[in-house]
Image (spheres, helix red, strand yellow):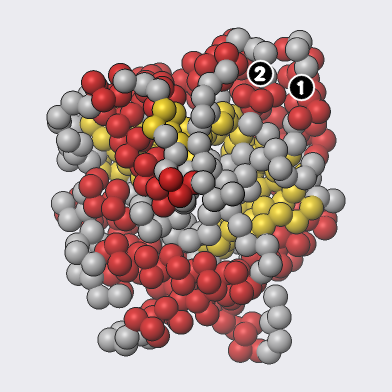
Amino acid sequence: MNLINKDDILQVIEMIESQHLDIRTITMGISLLDCIDPDVDRCCEKVYDKIITLAKDLVKTGEDIEHEYGIPVVNKRISVTPISLIGGSFDEEGYLRLALTLDRAAKAVGVNFIGGYTALVQKGMTKGDRAFLASIPRALAQTERVCCSVNVGSTKAGIDMSAIKLMGEAVKQTAALTAQDSGIGCAKLVVFANAVEDNPFMAGAFHGVGEAECVINVGVSGPGVVANALKTCKGKPFDEVAETIKKTAFRITRIGQLVAKEASRRLGAEFGIVDLSLAPTPARGDSVAEILELMGLERCGTHGTTAALALLNDAVKKGGVMASSHVGGLSGAFIPVSEDAGMIASAESGCLQLDKLEAMTCVCSVGLDMIAVPGDTPASTISAIIADECAIGMINNKTTAVRIIPVPGAKVGDRAEFGGLLGSAPVMAVHPESAEEFILRGGRIPAPIHSLRN
């Protein structure tokens, strides 16, 4: 970490104690490819045994590092090989068995989430993929710690609109099955374009097939640190704003690198990546919206917000890349509405609306994240929102995603409470005009011409 003098040490202490700097997650990625078995019982047994063997010391290691270094480690998590690949010969009930096995293993080792209940269907679906997608609502309703992601588009493959139709329906069904908790099952479900294989953040984490047997990926978060740094830049030109963010991101990433390497050494796993994503929390002073407003915007969501977010995202990436040779995941700025006090306030004031959030996703790390919409929103409208976001990702060769919650019984202006880091979200309006005929076409939107790079 190169803390070489007293001032550096005091600066890090200040970032931790009063600016909300933390290691948001240590995520152990585990390959389950050697657990494939046509017999459901044997497959589940192999999956459970491998997870609890490799991850048995994960939580303790995170706690030990936190105590020894004084750096908060908020979450300890696991990601696994996409389960649609592990259970490729299973029916819907077989996949549900795997979901319950993942949940049981997560509880046994003490992690708060396990990601990788995942399918990659950007170019089409196998018989097993269809069974997997059908299992999603029940899997999320019957498990506590399992997170699900589905990649339905990419710059190389185009967009699988048939899969998007099914995912809109899955979101609605998941909300209905978890209606007693404001549809919280949907908070564990994200739909991607251009999903990355080394993302440590939930709900989109999975262990890609190009990854090693067992790796440690660390996600660092410090919106409060960046906001505090920008308070010294009032009225200064954007060149200086960008330089300030880069230098701050560098310091944050070095702390993440220290923790990632130490956790990897202690757990006997390979060091994967440090993901420097400014992931906010509902706590005051830990907000991406506040950073944008410190650049001179009266309220996040007003004109100029997209430009401010573009500067922030780019400067964070540049600072992180200079700090570690293994920066990966998504690394940039997240804009989850329910998890950011400033975003919540902007949405409740009416300044931040769904269309503006979509525009902002063109330049941020992921996409429409933790958006609450009315419970009577049709599945076809949810599918159309997903399709729009995937089109942004496909055309711009970037990762985009949708994590949307049609809150059962809720109307525009209501507020859905999810608790903890998931926070609460004002229910936002969607366009009432139908997209059903558009979604019913199915098929595949072809990849853009710039995908032909060979």
Above or below for 227 versus 302: below
The CA span between labels 1 and 2 is 9 Å
In x, y percent, where is residue 162? 41, 22
Which residue is label 1 attached to?
A: 36
Query: Visible in this render: residue 326?
Result: yes
Q: What amino acid is at disc 2? A: Gly
Above or below for 285 versus 435: below
Is residue 69 left or right of 231 when viewed as pictured? right
Of residues 208 and 403, the one nearer the viewer is 208
Which residue is label 2 attached to?
A: 88
Location of residue 146 (image quadrant): top right
Q: What amino acid is at disc 1? A: Ile
At mark 1, the secondary structure is loop
In x, y percent, where is residue 228? 41, 76
Is residue 373 left or right of 420 when viewed as pictured? left
Residue at 43% in and 65% down: 313
Residues packed near mark 1 inside 10 Å, few (<14), some (14 to 19) or many (20 plus): some
In x, y percent, where is residue 220? 57, 61
Query: Visible in this render: residue 178?
Result: no
The mark that comes first in sequence, 1 or 2, is 1
Residue at 41% in and 28% down: 444
Residue at 57% in and 46% down: 196
State the mark number for residue 328: none
Of residues 244 and 122, the one nearer the viewer is 122
Q: Quadrant of the N terminus?
A: bottom right
Location of residue 100 (image quadrant): top right
Above or below for 422 versus 31: below
Of residues 58 and 332, the one nearer the viewer is 332
